[in-house]
């Protein structure tokens, strides 16, 4: 029999999308609620003095509550039940809370969160394939749900996905997932097909469906290609108002390479990093395809760009060609570049690590390089706060903090934190 918690008073947001409430001395993490509301919730898990529950009825609703456009469990839309302005405000509060609890640091105000259109923002996405259908996994399951109602993709993109599966026919049964990549105005779109274990996807003879410039797949370790294997954007599209980066500066990327996922805010994020990353010598660690490194080199800096993923490093090297010798690329893990950092002597280090944040060896390499400034781009407030405490202990002061809502209606938030050496 389900256990129902009556009349929970919701207090504040926590990382991951739940809200915090209390019941009989225990902390309750409740989904589907908004701070200030009174709700009835069903318990889904209990562990020691903590309870996880989901809202089943709203007793007193927040004025910010709205009806989600689609099932929030499809695509991780855990904030979709609240107005967009309230979503962004809560994400700022989550950052403040992470710095307070994990970094033992008090931010004077919640950081501003740059907003994004809620529809059609994803220009990069992974869709799972089951029974010749492609979509997101319904939260907590391996059941496929249609991504179109979530509005994360452009309508034309959803139509292309269906055409790809139709073009594959029986070969779609060998496909585990597909990765989409588009340029900012969706004039270029490619799909990478990821094969199931012990399966192969040779797409070299595939006739390209309408709406695609390329399809890639792997037959063993060999990459097979129909059409072109990458999309590209220029500074004129991403940085229309910036004069220090030539408008024809180009970034190309394949679908397997890491790149930010929001077509509307990637240029805004790049602008922020360029504003705070100006220096004669800069190191860009976890550089991906060179979003920041290319922009910094194009604006005049001598840049060392480090990327460990082979696919991203290949695109990084291609994007760097125009800017050599000012832009040096290195395919290596950040943990293994202490000698290169010492040689480059960066005034500024830009880092954009994965969700796990900086490893201890990576952090030690950064501190040993003694840059005047560290610009930290983070996709996880908790690991950012943890690493911020280590940087402050290593003789840096936290200055500017700014956030970007790269994934509307989800609990994710991107943060840029700037640390200056004392």
Image (cartoon, grey):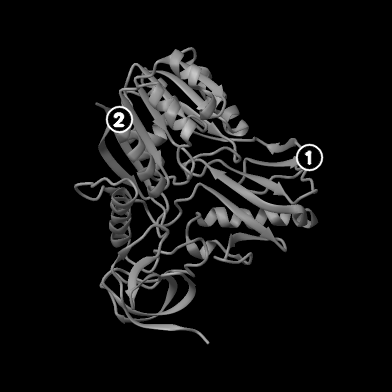
Q: Residue at x 23, y 47 (%)?
A: 106
* Residue 192 pos. (x, y %): 65, 44
Task: Tell me if residue 362 can be seen.
Answer: yes
Which numbered circle lies on residue 256? none
Task: Tell me if residue 271 can be seen.
Answer: no
- Determine which residue is flagged by label 1: 220
Name above or below for residue 249 compared with residue 89. above
- The answer to whether residue 318 is left or right of residue 17 is right
Name above or below for residue 309 compared with residue 113. above
Under circle 2, the secondary element is: helix
Q: CA distance from mark 1 to mark 2?
A: 43 Å
Q: Residue at x 31, y 48 (%)?
A: 99
The quadrant where residue 212 appears: top right
Under circle 1, the secondary element is: loop
- Determine which residue is flagged by label 2: 276
Q: Residue at x 76, y 50 (%)?
A: 197
């Amino acid at each position: 029999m389900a256990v129902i918690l009556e009349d929970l008073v919701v207090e504040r947001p926590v990382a991951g999308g739940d809200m915090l409430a209390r019941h009989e001395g225990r902390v309750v993490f409740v989904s589907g609620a908004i701070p200030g509301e009174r709700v009835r919730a069903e318990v889904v898990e209990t562990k020691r003095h903590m309870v996880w529950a989901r809202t089943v009825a709203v007793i007193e609703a927040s004025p910010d509550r709205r009806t989600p456009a689609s099932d929030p469990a499809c695509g991780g839309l855990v904030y979709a039940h609240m107005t967009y302005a309230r979503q962004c405000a809560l994400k700022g509060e989550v950052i403040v809370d992470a710095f307070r609890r994990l970094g033992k640091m008090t931010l004077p105000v919640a950081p501003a969160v740059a907003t994004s259109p809620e529809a059609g923002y994803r220009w990069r996405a992974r869709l799972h394939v089951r029974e010749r259908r492609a979509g997101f996994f319904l939260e907590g399951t391996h059941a496929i749900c249609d991504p179109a109602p979530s509005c994360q993709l452009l309508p034309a993109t959803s139509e292309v996905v269906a055409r790809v599966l139709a073009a594959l026919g029986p070969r779609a049964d060998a496909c585990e997932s597909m990765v989409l990549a588009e340029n900012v105005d969706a004039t270029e779109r490619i799909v990478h097909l990821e094969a199931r274990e012990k399966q192969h996807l040779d797409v070299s003879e595939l006739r390209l469906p309408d709406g695609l410039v390329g399809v890639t797949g792997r037959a063993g370790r060999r990459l097979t290609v129909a059409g072109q294997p990458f999309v590209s954007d220029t500074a004129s599209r991403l940085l229309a108002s910036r004069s220090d980066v030539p408008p024809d500066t180009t970034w190309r990327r394949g679908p397997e390479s890491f790149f930010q996922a929001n077509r509307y805010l990637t240029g805004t994020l790049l602008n922020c990093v360029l504003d705070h990353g100006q220096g004669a010598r800069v190191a860009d660690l976890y550089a991906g395809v060179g979003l920041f490194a290319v922009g910094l080199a194009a604006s005049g800096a001598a840049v060392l760009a480090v990327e460990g993923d082979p696919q991203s490093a290949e695109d990084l090297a291609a994007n760097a060609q125009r800017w050599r010798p000012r832009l040096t690329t290195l395919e290596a893990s950040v943990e293994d570049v202490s000698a290169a950092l010492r040689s480059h002597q960066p005034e500024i280090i830009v880092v954009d690590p994965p969700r796990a944040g900086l490893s201890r060896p990576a952090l030690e390499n950064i501190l040993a390089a003694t840059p005047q400034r560290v610009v930290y781009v983070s996709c996880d407030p908790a690991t950012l706060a943890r690493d911020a405490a280590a940087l402050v202990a290593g003789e840096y002061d936290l200055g500017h903090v700014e956030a970007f809502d790269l994934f509307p209606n989800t609990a994710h938030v991107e943060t840029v934190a700037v640390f200056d050496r004392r």
